[in-house]
């Protein structure tokens, strides 16, 4: 295990053939031809279609479920309810509160009471309507702040409170910090429910193979998690459940707990009927049942000296978790750990608590709590800049973390920090000085312009959120071609290509010799979930470990053959050679043959576990993540003051990501993240009125189209991390998490008024308040 | 339910099928004819994943009833080229990094094809308007727009 720690930090990218190059995606050709099979593209003979029945009330006791009529309905082969579960009824990463089939209660309108399997979709649709459920309605609570109060309806009576696990950050002494401050800003911010909006809806198919193993193929983001949940639900061994992810049409954190529930139901129906069973969600049901981005209710207080030196940050945050805990406590933690910005702040006191309500449940979505808190702290930075008449870029530069500084959690920053460089380069690229000055002069007419900037730090990988390890395998075939597998799933971000690049450069061969296999839970060790922007770092390090082990073994054989000392033997361009006498060489393929003839195995497992972190959850102090990515975004906007419409004209996204293994894919992450952030800033909200979800498709839930986003610009800043594969850190979430405050700061300059509640929709920009599309039910 | 006989051209081949009158073109192509490059995303004509070309124009196949295609000429991603070769738009999408998860890509490429067939040198904003009906959650569209610009060049050089 210590081996990977002592690996010589590579001479990085010098002489490498693929790392740091814009290598074409391995799956690009298939994808442009429309060939890859996504989950809904799979079929099997004798297949049944599953359809689920949803709760009728946001909170109710289930008195009785009568399935007789549904069972006798044409084409129906199986019906399952709470009474059919062979094993565990609950699952959950943090609190085991989630159910694939509702038990004594339903807690929101997306709870599933019963599932039928029938020969055709239409028969399943018809049969599920014939299930009769008797409910006793219970009082419900829809506002997490109300849910915290004494006497509020409890979702889980046995817990005696709706509060989950409170999180805190404590550093220094905020009282002292505020005393030392010349200016104190107090503000409240809110963010809404958001839908991940992967364009491929959830889908899976389950069947039993000849060995009696339950096979489940589908749009699983985290196949290992799903396998564990399904095994528990069925009370079967992990070896008897095999989960295979199909090509994923996006997930962004979304195809997680719901996919586990879908897997449970299909597997059980398959066991019951002996037939393959499939389901593909309609968009409406995908909205209804899947988790959302957590709404945050944030109270912030920030103290600063008249010179603009941050002295204290205090925050108190309530997070709507909806009916299930999911990852909410850790989302709250991530929110406050990063919620004081990437700054030297000596005094921090932050509290966040996630709370049960009868709303749709919330959980991981690209950014994981930080897009919400970044809106607060980075808006306040601009308020401070305005009050103290300091340029917003200068204010940030003054406080920006550098190597050797202490971060807001009290963590000493021992690594290189590219934040200052990213700030300067971003400001330059957007034309900050000129534009900021120009737009601060009085503007007339309907169209007003503004420019805004924001920055953040992101702890990479799981850190304080959990145990973190990943596996990979590298197998050199007898013809010199190579198969690479990791436990990391490709959601579309391109991790296959990154892993292949890493393996190719370590083995000194061209990338077209590499085939990447997507994980199958029975064929590769559990590598944890593909979340937390951990793919390149964790999977990349595991791949590196496996490839290095294979290479070492080959070098030993080649050294004997060339009669060279092992340390002189290098491999690149498909050949091994002696660096002292380069004429002494042997091709990679020849070396493989020699190894095969000597019965030297060219297969290796790689393993990587995260460096130690030290976070005291009780006290809220320590080192929550072992290293960070630093990000800066800037936006230029035009606001139509007659309609409230905001148009983002220019956008620059800069990140110190350690090392860009594949710059083309890195830009893809940056631009995609920026578009998602613009959605968060300006357009997106799932409106939930008294537990009823009003936006359930893309007609009213508006995603940014190609016409709503500008010609993005990206900046790669590289401060290689000694622990990262070729110095790489991560990028997926940094790309999204600081977009919204940059846009909002630009809007504030344009209209001279700030928006504290997201999204900055037409009516909020024009009228300063939200107009609901929907009327609330009258009470009483 | 009584089935209707429908004749139309799919990817250059004359097709004769029987189907229920209420079936959508999307279901006909995916489920009955097995062309899985046409994707199901929202089924209300918002996301564009089910885009096909009908008589030279872009349609959301979830919004077209199968009987409406009687006598029409339909092209899906599978029929973009007559063999395994790549269309310049496909080459451009690969080279410019325009593909991530790939779910929106068939529809996106077909929208680009109709644009470039009608307008060989489109401006950036014309490209954006042409693909505004195709939602992509992964890419932020920039590399797609760049790819379509590049494809226009490739097609001119052909």
Image: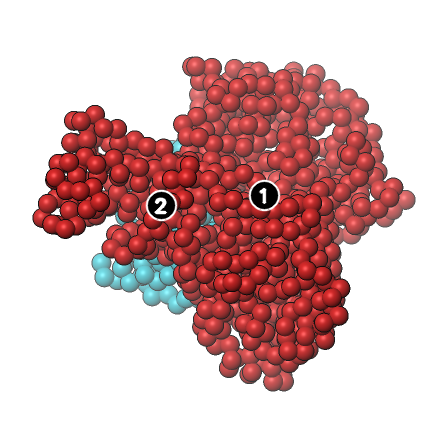
Chain colours: A red, B cyan
Q: Nearer the viewer, residue A445 or B21?
A: A445
User: In this view of the protein, can residue A224 be seen by the observer?
Assistant: yes
Q: Which quadrant of the structure image shows residue A760?
A: bottom right
The C terminus of chain A, quarter of image: top right
User: To which chain does the residue with label 1 belong?
Assistant: A
* Residue under the point 50% across and 60% down: A630
The residue furthest front is: A565
Residue picked out by circle 2: A7
Q: Nearer the viewer, residue A276 or B41?
A: A276
Q: Residue at x 54, y 52 (%)?
A: A459
Q: Which residue is mark 1?
A: A465
SS of the residue under disc 2: loop
* Labels 1 and 2 in the same subunit: yes
The mark that comes first in sequence, 1 or 2, is: 2
Residue placed farthest to the left in the image? A583
Task: Report the residue that reaches farthest toward the right.
Answer: A780
User: Which of the labelled discs sits on residue B6, or is there none?
Assistant: none
Q: Could you tell me residue B12's position as x and y percent?
A: 31, 42
Could you tell me residue B122's position as x and y percent?
Answer: 37, 65
Q: On the image, which quarter does residue A7 sit in?
A: top left
Judging from the image, what secondary structure is the residue with disc 1 in? helix
Residue depicted at 81% across the width and 48% down the height: A146
The reply to whether residue A50 is in sight is: no
Crowd tier of the residue under label 2, counting other residues whose Cα lies within 10 Å: few below 14, some 14–19, many 20 or above: few
The number of numbered badges drawn on the structure is 2
């Amino acid at each position: 295990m210590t081996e990977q720690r002592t690996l010589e930090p590579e001479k990085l990218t010098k002489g490498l053939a693929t790392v740091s190059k814009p290598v074409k995606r391995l799956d690009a050709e298939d994808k442009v031809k429309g060939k890859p099979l996504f989950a809904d593209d799979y079929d099997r003979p004798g297949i049944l279609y599953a359809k689920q029945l949803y709760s009728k009330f946001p909170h109710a006791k289930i008195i009785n479920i009568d399935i007789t009529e549904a069972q006798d309905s044409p084409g129906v082969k199986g019906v399952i309810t709470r009474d059919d579960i062979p094993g565990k009824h609950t699952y959950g990463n943090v609190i085991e509160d989630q159910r694939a089939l509702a038990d004594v209660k339903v807690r929101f309108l997306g709870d599933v009471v019963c599932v039928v399997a029938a020969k055709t979709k239409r028969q399943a649709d018809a049969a599920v309507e014939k299930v009769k459920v008797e409910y006793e309605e219970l009082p419900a609570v829809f506002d997490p702040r109300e849910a915290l109060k004494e006497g509020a309806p409890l979702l889980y009576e046995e817990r005696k409170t709706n509060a989950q696990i409170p999180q805190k950050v404590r550093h220094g002494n905020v009282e002292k910090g505020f005393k030392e401050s010349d200016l104190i800003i107090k503000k409240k911010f809110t963010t809404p429910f958001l839908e991940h909006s992967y364009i491929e809806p959830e889908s899976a198919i389950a069947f039993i193979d000849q060995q009696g193993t339950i096979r489940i193929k589908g749009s699983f983001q985290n196949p290992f998690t799903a396998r564990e949940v399904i095994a528990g639900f069925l009370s079967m061994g992990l070896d008897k459940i095999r989960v295979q992810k199909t090509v994923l049409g996006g997930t962004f954190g979304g195809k997680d707990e719901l996919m586990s529930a879908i897997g449970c139901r299909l597997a059980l129906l398959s066991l019951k009927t002996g037939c393959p069973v499939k389901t593909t969600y309609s968009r409406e049901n995908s909205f209804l049942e899947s988790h959302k981005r957590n709404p945050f209710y944030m109270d912030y207080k920030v103290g600063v000296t008249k010179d603009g030196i941050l002295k204290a940050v205090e925050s108190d945050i309530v997070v709507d978790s909806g009916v299930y805990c999911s990852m909410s406590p850790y989302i709250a933690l991530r929110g406050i750990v990063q919620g004081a910005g990437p700054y030297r702040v000596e005094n921090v006191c932050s509290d966040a608590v996630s709370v049960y309500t009868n709303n749709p449940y919330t959980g991981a979505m690209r950014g994981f709590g930080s897009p919400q808190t970044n809106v607060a702290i980075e808006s306040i930075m601009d308020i401070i800049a305005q009050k103290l008449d300091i340029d917003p870029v200068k204010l940030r530069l003054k406080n920006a973390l550098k190597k050797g500084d202490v971060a807001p959690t009290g963590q000493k920053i021992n690594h290189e920090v590219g934040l200052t460089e990213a700030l300067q380069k971003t400001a330059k690229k957007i034309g900050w000085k000129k534009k900021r000055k120009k737009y601060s002069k009085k503007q007339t007419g309907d169209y007003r312009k503004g420019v805004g900037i924001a920055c953040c730090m992101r702890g990479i990988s799981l850190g304080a959120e959990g145990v973190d390890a990943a596996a990979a395998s590298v197998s050199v075939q007898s013809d010199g071609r190579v198969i690479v597998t990791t436990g990391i799933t490709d959601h579309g971000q391109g991790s296959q290509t990154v892993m292949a690049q890493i393996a190719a450069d370590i083995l000194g061969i061209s990338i077209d010799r590499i085939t990447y296999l997507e994980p199958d839970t029975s064929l590769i060790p559990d590598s944890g979930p593909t979340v937390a922007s951990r793919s390149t770092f964790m999977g990349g390090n595991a791949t590196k470990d496996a490839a290095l082990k294979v290479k070492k073994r080959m070098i030993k054989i080649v050294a004997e053959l060339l009669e060279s000392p092992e340390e002189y033997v290098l491999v690149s361009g498909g050949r091994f050679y002696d660096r002292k006498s380069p004429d002494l060489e042997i091709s990679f393929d020849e070396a493989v043959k020699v190894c095969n003839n000597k019965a030297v195995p060219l297969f290796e497992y790689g393993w990587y576990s995260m460096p130690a972190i030290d976070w005291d959850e009780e006290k809220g102090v320590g080192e929550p993540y072992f290293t960070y990515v630093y990000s800066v975004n800037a936006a230029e906007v035009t606001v139509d003051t007659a309609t409230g419409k905001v148009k983002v004209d220019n956008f620059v996204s800069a990140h110190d990501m350690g090392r860009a293994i594949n710059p083309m894919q890195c830009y893809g992450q940056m631009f995609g993240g920026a578009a998602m952030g613009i959605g968060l800033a300006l357009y997106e909200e799932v409106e939930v009125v008294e537990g009823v979800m009003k936006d359930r498709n893309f007609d009213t839930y508006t995603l940014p189209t190609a016409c709503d986003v500008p010609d993005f610009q990206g900046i790669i800043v590289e401060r290689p991390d000694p622990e990262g594969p070729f110095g790489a850190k991560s990028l997926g979430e940094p790309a999204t998490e600081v977009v919204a405050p940059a846009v909002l700061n630009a809007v504030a300059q344009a209209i001279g008024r700030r928006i504290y509640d997201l999204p900055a929709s037409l009516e909020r920009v024009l009228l300063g308040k939200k107009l609901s599309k929907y009327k609330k039910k009258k009470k009483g | 339910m009584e089935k209707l006989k429908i004749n139309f051209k799919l990817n250059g081949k004359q097709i004769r099928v029987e189907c229920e009158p209420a079936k959508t073109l999307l279901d006909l192509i995916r489920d009955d004819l097995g062309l899985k490059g046409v994707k199901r995303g929202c089924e209300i004509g918002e996301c564009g994943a089910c885009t096909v070309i009908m008589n030279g124009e872009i349609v959301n196949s979830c919004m077209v009833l199968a009987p409406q295609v009687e006598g029409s000429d339909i092209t899906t991603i599978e029929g973009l080229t007559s063999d395994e070769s790549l269309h310049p738009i496909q080459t451009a999408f690969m080279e410019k990094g325009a593909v991530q998860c790939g779910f929106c890509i068939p529809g996106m490429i077909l929208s680009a094809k109709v644009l470039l067939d009608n307008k060989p040198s489109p401006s950036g904003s014309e490209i954006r308007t042409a693909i505004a009906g195709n939602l992509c959650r992964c890419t932020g569209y920039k590399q797609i727009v760049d790819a379509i610009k590049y494809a226009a060049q490739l097609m001119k050089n052909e």
